[in-house]
Image (cartoon, helix red, strand yellow):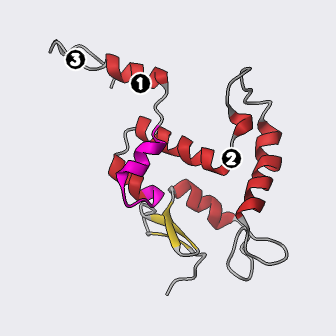
Amino acid sequence: MRNKHEKFCSKRGLDCWLKVSDQTLPIHIDLAEIFAGLKHHQDGRVFRDSLRGVLKPDTVRLVLRREVITALKNRFPTPAREIGFEHATPHSFRHFFTSQAFVDGASASHIRDWLGHQDSKMVDHYRHLADEESQRRMQGIDFLGEGNRSGG
């Protein structure tokens, strides 16, 4: 049985995943290498609460807000009356990841597996193609059969 906080990669690094509690999350090889280089505590955790060991979701949210969002919001300014980087939550990154995966051509079934969903309807909920990317793909459709489109 595997430790509930271990990470694994195949020898070629093509099959990487992170076991967190009772959920297994597939991860990119670059992220696996970053995790491998981080200090692991005696209980096997990389990230932990200094008192109890197990992180509470609210702690993660507060640290993300303080250490990442607030620290970087000036580098990623939000236009007036819009929602942007400064409004991000941990869940926002899940939406961003899903949108980028779709834009980069990942299939809905792969994304569903990566997110740990049983049903692709939930994946569609996260799907956000940027207007510009959506238009680029639409313009790439060769409706007239002329074979000279190059957008998608």
Name the residue tied to disc 2: 89
Secondary structure at numbered mark 3: loop
Name the residue tied to disc 3: 142
Name the residue tied to disc 1: 134
Among the two numbered marks 1 and 3 on one chain, the one whose residue lies closer to the N terminus: 1
Q: Count the labels in the image.
A: 3
Viewer-closest of 77 and 147: 77
Among the two numbered marks 2 and 3 on one chain, the one whose residue lies closer to the N terminus: 2
Secondary structure at numbered mark 2: loop
Mark 1–mark 2 Cα distance, whole angstroms, equals 25 Å
Is 54 on the left or on the right of 51, as rendered?
Answer: left
Is 127 on the left or on the right of 67, as rendered?
Answer: left
Is 107 on the left or on the right of 98, as rendered?
Answer: left
Quarter of the C terminus within the rendering: top left
Asked whether disc 2 touches disc 3, contact meaning CB atoms under 8 Å apart, the reply is no
- Frontmost of labels 2 and 3 is 2
Q: Residue at x 77, y 46 (%)?
A: 68
Q: In the image, which residues are magenta?
A: 114-127
